[in-house]
Amino acid sequence: MSEHNDPERVWDEYDWERFLQQQDRKTERYMELLEQYNDDPERDRIIAREMGWNHVIDADSSEWEDNDGLDEDADAQDDFSVDAEIEAEGFELHPLYQASFALTVWMDQLFDELGDLENSPSAVKLIANSHVASSKLAAAFSDDDIDEIGMTIAYLKRALKAMSVSIDASLQFGQEAKLNPQQRRQLRIRLFQVRDGIVEAMGQYRAEWRRRFGQSR
């Protein structure tokens, strides 16, 4: 994806990070409006107006029937769709994604064995951020277009951030859940396997970026 004002320039990881942050803010704003106007019969039009989706406001009213919230086709014109990226084939075969997915499956099984952990903040933070990391890796590895290396790195950075939160939460979780030594060891190994894999992948993609495009800004 290139800068609109400079179609020849390839976006680097910092361009993509700014873009993804912008989409995060849009998503947060949309969720706030949805919660605020959820029971209003004019909810969709109010949200469209507040979000600046003029093309949605001008649409024929019949297009709003049976539409629970956001008009996905219209919204796709403005917002980057992570779901669309995740639907692409290939990421399921990447070893790092497979490791992260195996981690979430293993933790789900562990949580089932340990019993009710819904009221444990550390458990919720641990599993939630591990799932976030897995989804970010899916997005990172879903596009093999060499022009989108910057996007891949940006998603890897987000996956790394989520894994760091998971690792921090695992320390408290191990104490609260009274994990035995083997469980603690397995949890640590799996978490750091994914974390270290992300760091290594970021280094490889950055080296490839420099080889093809020179230094990032």
Image (cartoon, rainbow, N blue to C red):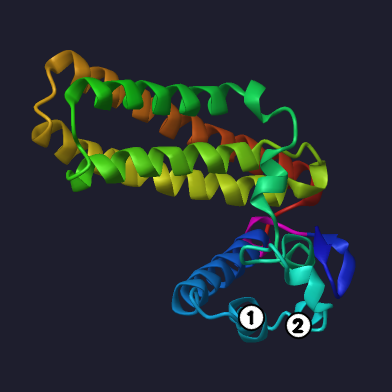
Between 122 and 115, the one lying in front of the other is 115
Where is residue 35? Give x, y as percent. Answer: 45, 72
Residue at screen point 47% across, 28% down = 100
Residue at screen point 61% across, 79% down = 47
Q: Looking at the image, which residue sits at the far right?
A: 8
Q: Quadrant of residue 20?
A: bottom right
Query: Which numbered disc, 1 or 2, marks the residue closer to the eye?
Result: 2
Between 7 and 210, the one lying in front of the other is 7
Where is residue 15? Give x, y as percent. Answer: 67, 64
Q: Amino acid at mark 2?
A: Ile
Q: How many marks?
A: 2
Residue at screen point 49% across, 27% down = 101
Between 117 and 57, the one lying in front of the other is 57
Q: Which of the two labelled residues, at mark 1 and mark 2, occupies the earlier sequence position?
A: 1
Label 2 crowd (10 A; few <14 / some 14-19 / many >=20): some
Q: Which residue is mark 1?
A: 51
Q: Looking at the image, which residue sits at the far top?
A: 182
Q: Which residues are magenta?
A: 11-15
Which secondary structure, mark 1?
helix
Between 115 and 208, the one lying in front of the other is 115
Q: Is residue 152 left or right of residue 2?
A: left
Q: Amino acid at mark 1?
A: Met
Q: Which corner quadrant holds the N terminus? A: bottom right
Q: Which mark is residue 57?
A: 2
Q: Is residue 20 left or right of residue 120?
A: right
Label 1 crowd (10 A; few <14 / some 14-19 / many >=20): some
Q: Is residue 128 left or right of residue 207?
A: left
Which secondary structure is most common in the magenta stretch? helix
Q: Is residue 44 magenta?
A: no
